[in-house]
Amino acid sequence: MPTAPKIGLLKGLGLTLKTALTPATTQQYPHVKPDLPPRTRGVIALMEENCTVCFQCARECPDWCIYIDSHKLTVPPKEPGGRSRTRNQLDRFAIDFALCMYCGICVEVCPFDALFWSPEFEYSEHRIADLTHEMDQLREWMDTVPPPPPLEVGAAMPKEVQDGQRAAAKAVEEAAEAARAAAEAAAQAEAAAQPAAEPAPDFDQETYDRLLAEGKSERVAKAKAKKAAAKQRSAAGGQPGGSASPQADDGGSGSPQAGAQAAAAAEPAAEPAPEFDQETYDRLLAEGKSERVAAAKAKAAAAKRRRQASEGSEGDQ
Amino acid sequence: MESILTFDSLLFTVVVKVLVIVAFFLVAALVVGYLEHKVMGHMQDRTGPMEAGLGPVKHGVGQLVADGAKFIQKEDIIPRSADRWVFAIAPGVALVPTLMILVVIPFGPGVWAENLDLGLFFALAASGVTVIGVLMAGWASANKFSLMGAIRDAAQLIAYELPLVLAGAAVALQAGTLSLVEIVERQNELVLFDTIPVWYGVPQVIGFGLFFVAAMAELNRPPFDMPIADSEIIAGHMTEYTGLRYAFFMLSEYAGMVVLSALAVVLFLGGWYPWPGADLPDGAWGAVIGTVTTIAKTVILAMVMTWARATFPRLREDQLQRMAWTILIPLALAQIVVIAIVIVVLP
């Protein structure tokens, strides 16, 4: 049996009547331009200066509507005597908007911010071939790309901005650190030279006595005392030298031999390190080598010696 | 009272009447069609047609004229296996009855083509002829969807013609005449309880509702548009039609809205009288005021049809038939019995 008509019929009539009496939300498009959000996918613009011809956009495009041609360009070296480099020169960059499905993968994938979305959408053509926009036209669309909308309150900054801020903060910190380390290293180099004269204590007498008094076995007490001594030494010498003075590191090595070496190293730290092995130079000249070769080899020998010295101190520990 | 379109020469009278009726028929269909576009648009939070205009007047007032111009340009296709002759004249057969009803509808004092003694009978009988054109179209198209649509339309007409006729009969019973002009005059004289002048729409409110619903169903107006339900049988009997012939079917739908609304106005809403018990001046002013009143009421009723179209979903075929046979017809019968008893009991 059919059920009797209920109040819903009248409610429906009321709803349509109410809708009829409220103004329609239609925008009369050709007369009224739509108010589009800034990230509207209208047309893709190309900032050709940013393009490195990496082909990522063309490869990722699901319907292969991006055409790129390029050739290699040899760039002369920046400094005389340097190596000349090659660079990709963009010859053609075209997007066939008859094929494009506006997925935006090319814009997303571009690692150098060369592709952008523009909200312009009125570029229909009478010929389908005219929908292939070449580089100059894509460049013109760039003028229509709106600035990115402001972030919401409390939103995280974009990753690249975050990276930049972090790098800037780090640079400031490093500069301060380097200045501090340089000052410290200078002080330490002097300090390191002194304890290196007498052998560094191998054994912390105080700790040994205390542990014995606490009733530990002699063996345990001796081991702990040695350890404590090592700790003290490393606390005294193991200060971070930083890149300011690599040689100051050597001052921290604890063994007597290393101590002696550190003293030796601490001395040149004050005056410039020998960059040139005079002995080798003389020998090579005597052997009849050219002056240039002799100088280079002398330098290499000096560098080798320095390296051996630092390795030797590490090996002793 | 004679029709104002009557002249000394019979031939001239006939020509003038035919021209006036055809002109009104076309203009009214276009106006109601345009209003339906706009009203339904706004009911769906749209604006409807906005561009096509007549001269400086925009808001889509010329939309249906443009549509007509388009229909004329369309290719007139007749399917190879169609019954060409029947196929060709079917739209006319569907259209002419609507035109014929206009002959007897009075729009104002003296503003009618013919005042038949059997006016109501003529109007209801003519409205039933439309289905012949629909059946012809459906059969001659040699298309299963067309045929199913035509059969559904015939079934619907049989089901809904009954409440339509019974509701009209109740009015004739109360008025004591079948002449539509007489019905309007008697209606204006009706005074309820010797104090409140009312139209037949008040004592016969059930009959008015039945008449209105049945009229919508006869015109295949949504929510009773199962015979032309596009989601299951494409466009019913109009499936194979193109161009002007298709436009004829559309025209008969919109003209049907006007004609049946006008008939409802005449039967239940006091015809050309602006309010119950009103007195119109004699002569030209009375004719003008009466005509404007009738047309205004007619347009309002046609817009209510559009309102229902924009609101209610389509009835399923079985719901459609069940509604007619188990609700509308028993109600109409009960109403006619009650009216008859009241007429006899109350002098």
Image (cartoon, rainbow, N blue to C red):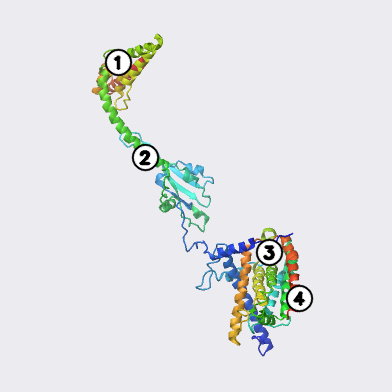
Q: CA distance from mark 2 to mark 3?
A: 68 Å
Chain for disc number 4: B
Could one spot residue B327 in this view of the protein? yes
Q: Residue at x 60, y 87 (%)?
A: B283
A16 left or right, relative to B137: left
Dot label at residue B225 = 3
Q: Amino acid at mark 2?
A: Gln
Q: Residue at x 52, y 55 (%)?
A: A128
As rendered, which of B251 and A277 lies closer to the eye? B251
Category of crowding for the residue at label 4, using alpha-carbon neighbours closer than 10 angstroms: few (below 14), some (14–19), many (at least 20): few
Dot label at residue B341 = 4
Q: Are marks 4 and 1 on the same chain?
A: no
A149 left or right, relative to B116: left
Q: Above or below — where is B273 with respect to A158?
A: below
Q: Which residue is mark 1?
A: A259
Q: Amino acid at mark 3?
A: Asp
Q: Amino acid at mark 4?
A: Ile
In percent of width and height, residue A204 lies at 33, 13
First in sequence: mark 3 or mark 4?
Answer: 3
Q: CA distance from mark 3 to mark 4?
A: 36 Å
Q: CA distance from mark 2 to mark 1?
A: 43 Å
Q: Amino acid at mark 1?
A: Gly
Q: Which residue is mark 2?
A: A165
